[in-house]
Amino acid sequence: MKAVVLTGIRKMQLTEIPEPVISSDKDVKIKLKTIGVCGSDIHYYSEGKIGSQVVDYPFRVGHECSGEIAEIGAAVDNVKVGDLVVVDPSVHCGSCDQCLAGRPHTCRNNKFLGCPGQIEGCLSEFIVMPSFTCFPVTGKLNAIQAALIEPLTIGVYAVNLAAIKNKNTTVAIFGAGPIGLSILMKLKADMVADVGMIEPLDYRLIKAGDIGASWQINPGEEEVEEEVKNRNELLLDVVFEASGEQEAVNNAIKILKPGGKLVLVGIPPEAQYVFNMDLMRRKELTVINVRRQNHCVQEAIDLVTSGAVDVEKMVTHEFNLEETPVAFDMVEGYKFGTVKAMINL
Ligand SMILES: [Zn+2]
Ligand SMILES: [Zn+2]
């Protein structure tokens, strides 16, 4: 089968490799339909690592995907051959303390699709996964919507962790990439009225406006704290950080009101952030860390199926498998107004 593998920093190759085979009676073989290019794939592409997660070449990335069930193991009963499925890239063990505590996303033995040293990614014609990772969506979603469920789940989970109970809660999001936009979409589906977007790329601010942001600030051109104060004198209840930038964290602490919540979703390039502890303590801010998602796949599917979220709004470019290197280059350089690039097979 055809596959795209990383062979070095900014090096990618289309190759021919053997098709994967079902090795457990609970496995399914999936024929890939659509694969989303994620910011984390780009880190592996351009830096060869994310923190302690280092690529050993050659390696195949890709974890946001939809596909058609091509073959099932003897004990599989949740999907059948021909089903279009959303694939949850996270494979948990089901028996460690975290799994037993209802936290499979922090499973001690977690293996993640397209994560170095864990499972080869989905940039290929077929993958084999345990059937519990597959959610059938035939007749509900198209292949592109189905592949966008994974990034959407991160937004859904982050918003659920923030536990916003009042629709008049004032909110800001730093970063209008696919994750920031997913957070925005979930907040709008929850009817949260006042959600602002802070983002240095104007075309992404426009996209956020299309999706329903009530106000937009470009931190490269405007003073964030001052602009927020002009709008909300008492400052904000909740801030989602989805850019991974220290500067955004600094500003987030400034624009949160006493008792506010800072939800950290973005992945910083370095392992550490610096927090203004004096301000954070005086305001008694709550900091919430978000690790991928937990039990949000079905909710994300339902949000798209019901029409509450139009997840395809974030798609700006589509490619075929052979064009994957072009897609990665574009997403890395934020070229041509890229927000989300999809690879269709
Ligand atoms: Zn991703
Ligand atoms: Zn586990």
Image: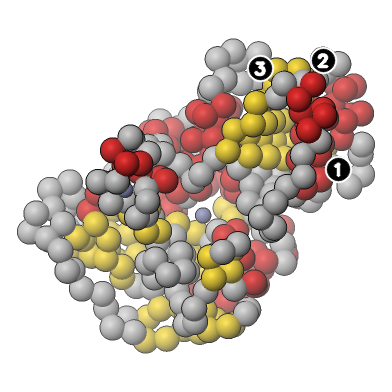
Q: Is residue 253 left or right of residue 179?
A: right
Q: Earlier in the sequence, mark 2 or mark 1?
A: 1
Q: Residue at x 79, y 51 (%)?
A: 201
Cα–Cα span, label 1 and label 3: 22 Å
Callout 2 touching callout 1 (CB < 8 Å): no
Label 1, ligand 1: CB separation under 8 Å: no
Marks 2 and 3 close (CB-CB < 8 Å): no
Q: Residue at coordinates 52% horizontally, 29% vertically from top-left?
A: 161
- Indicate which disc residue 164 carries: none
At label 3, counting other C-alpha atoms closer than 10 Å, the crowd grade (few under 14, some 14-19, many 20 or more) is: some
Residue at x-position 54% and y-position 35%:
158
Label disc, if present, on residue 234 of the rendered structure: 2
Q: x%, y% of residue 29?
A: 23, 65
The residue indicated by pointer 3 is 169
> What amino acid is found at the position of numbered circle 3 in the picture?
Thr
Q: Quadrant of the N terminus?
A: bottom left
Q: Earlier in the sequence, mark 1 or mark 3?
A: 3
| Residue 219, label in figure | 1
Visible in this render: residue 83?
no
The secondary structure type at the circle numbered 1 is loop
Q: What residue is drawn where x is 57% and y is 20%?
A: 164
Q: Report helix, strand or loop for mark 3.
A: loop
Q: Quadrant of the C terminus?
A: bottom left
The answer to which of 286 and 234 lies nearer the viewer is: 286
Q: Residue furthest bottom?
A: 16
- Res. 301 image quadrant: top left
